[in-house]
Amino acid sequence: MRHHSFPFTSCVRESYAALTVLALRLVIVLSTMHPLLQKAKPTPSPNMINKPMPRVKFSPECELRVFRSSDVICLDSDSDHTIGTDAEDDDSDDSSIQPQAPPMTIQHYRLGDTLRSTKDMEQFTALGDTIQSIYTLQLSEFAWIKRNSGDWTFCQLIERAENDRGEEVMTFSVSEMGHRKSLRPYRWINMVRKCSSHVRSEYFRSVMISL
């Protein structure tokens, strides 16, 4: 029995052969272009060249100091630039330093003595500070009270107690003879002041001298 070849089979064979040849040619072309692709460098676009670099922002707590070349002074050069002397630096620093007031001398008073200087009593511009200063007076602490004559008298707080109305009353010893003066709260702001830190009692100084 004789086999006959059909035209379709021959066409498939020819197509297969043509595809094989085309694939071989493509492989050869790619192998020759591979070194050229490695050497080629991408060219940046004009937008990338002209685009400014983003600025980095720092918080005030992380400020960076930028040193310029003009700030650096070469010691080996013969230029006329000189570094500021210590005296100039001291002058610039002294301008920001406030002169300190001399310490106050200790002032001694006896019970019943009149105020010699307003520096011997605490004074505040704010009303609230004045009230707070008066309210913090402790027993046996010295203070100033205003008498009917308008003078401020050196005294000592000897009692803080409530009256029948439930008010806290301050009682002061105003003389070495044992005279007392009691003040209700509504009179404290006008008639009581705390002593300054440099005020002392004459009694304690005499005791220290006797020791």
Image (spheres, grey):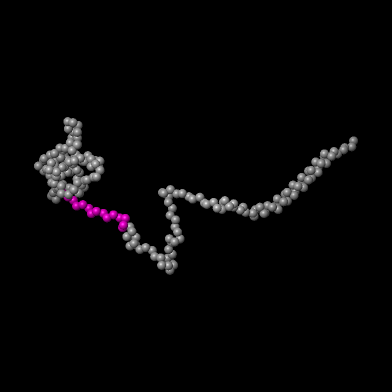
Quarter of the figure with residue 165 = top left
Q: Give the range drawn in magenta.
A: 94-108
Can residue 125 be found in the magenta stretch?
no
- Residue 3's spot in the image, x, y percent? 87, 37
Magenta span: helix, strand or loop, mainly? loop
- Residue 141's spot in the image, x, y percent? 18, 42
Left or right: residue 164 compared with residue 56: left
- Residue 43's spot in the image, x, y percent? 61, 53
Q: Residue at x 25, y 41 (%)?
A: 128
Can residue 103 be found in the magenta stretch?
yes
Left or right: residue 13 compared with residue 85: right
Left or right: residue 61 compared with residue 113: right
Is residue 44 among the parts visible in the rendering? yes
Is residue 141 among the parts visible in the rendering? no
Q: Residue furthest top?
A: 164
Q: Which image quarter holds the N terminus?
A: top right
Q: How many labels does the image show?
A: 0
Q: Which residue is drawn at 17% across and 31% down?
A: 164
Q: In front: 179, or 153?
A: 153
Q: Residue furthest right?
A: 1
Q: Which residue lies furthest to the bottom in this view?
A: 78
Left or right: residue 127 compared with residue 63: left
- Residue 201's spot in the image, x, y percent? 16, 47
Q: Residue at x 68, y 52 (%)?
A: 34
Q: Which residue is drawn at 17% across and 32% down?
A: 163
